[in-house]
Amino acid sequence: MFALTFEEFKTLGGKYFKENDSAMFDRLKYKAIKQIYHAVNQKVIPNEKADDVKYLLVELIQLHKLNDRDIKSVNNDGYSVTYNLTETSEFESACYQLCLDYLGAELCYLGVDM
């Protein structure tokens, strides 16, 4: 379901990566997949949503790439990175909204089914 190669990413309109950035792509794809699992609360995503998931991955990877640029400070004495918390919550909200747009409310519903 989450198989997306660097070439497919570019074919589907993905940008912001250099040709030799496949390691960065893989790292951000992992983050995007975790974001999707969080949004659907670990639910199984139906196979008919496979194309939606690929396009969602492209969007989330690009969003993660742009967000990685916005670092408040870096300290390499013990290595720590500080992000602006307001922007982080806005980022999380934007990621969740993308998941809602592509997967629908029925998959992203976090309430209790009766």
Image: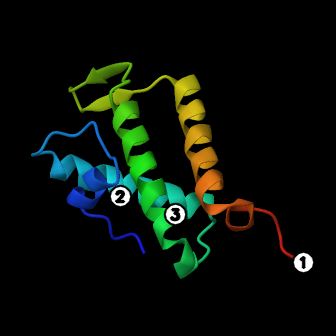
Q: Which residue is mark 3?
A: 52
The alpha-carbon separation of the residues under discs 3 and 1 comes to 27 Å
Q: Is residue 68 left or right of residue 17?
A: right
Between 1 and 39, the residue placed more toward the observer is 1
Between 6 and 83, the residue placed more toward the observer is 6
Residue drawn at (38%, 47%) of the image: 61
Report the number of discs. Answer: 3
Kind of residue sitting beneath label 2: Tyr
| N-terminal-most mark, 3 or 1 | 3
Residue drawn at (24%, 32%) of the image: 78
Q: Which residue is mark 1?
A: 114
The alpha-carbon separation of the residues under discs 2 and 3 comes to 17 Å
- Tell which residue pokes out farthest to the top in this image: 72
Q: Which residue is mark 2?
A: 30
76 relative to 42, above or below: above
The alpha-carbon separation of the residues under discs 2 and 1 comes to 32 Å
Q: Quadrant of residue 41?
A: bottom right
| Helix, strand or loop at mark 1 | loop
| Helix, strand or loop at mark 3 | helix
Q: Is residue 85 left or right of residue 64?
A: right
Kind of residue sitting beneath label 1: Met
Number of residues whose C-alpha sits closer than 10 Å to that of mark 1, classed few (under 14), some (14–19) or many (20 or more)? few
13 relative to 55, above or below: above
The N terminus appears in which quarter of the rendering?
bottom left
Between label 3 and label 1, give the one nearer the viewer. Answer: 3
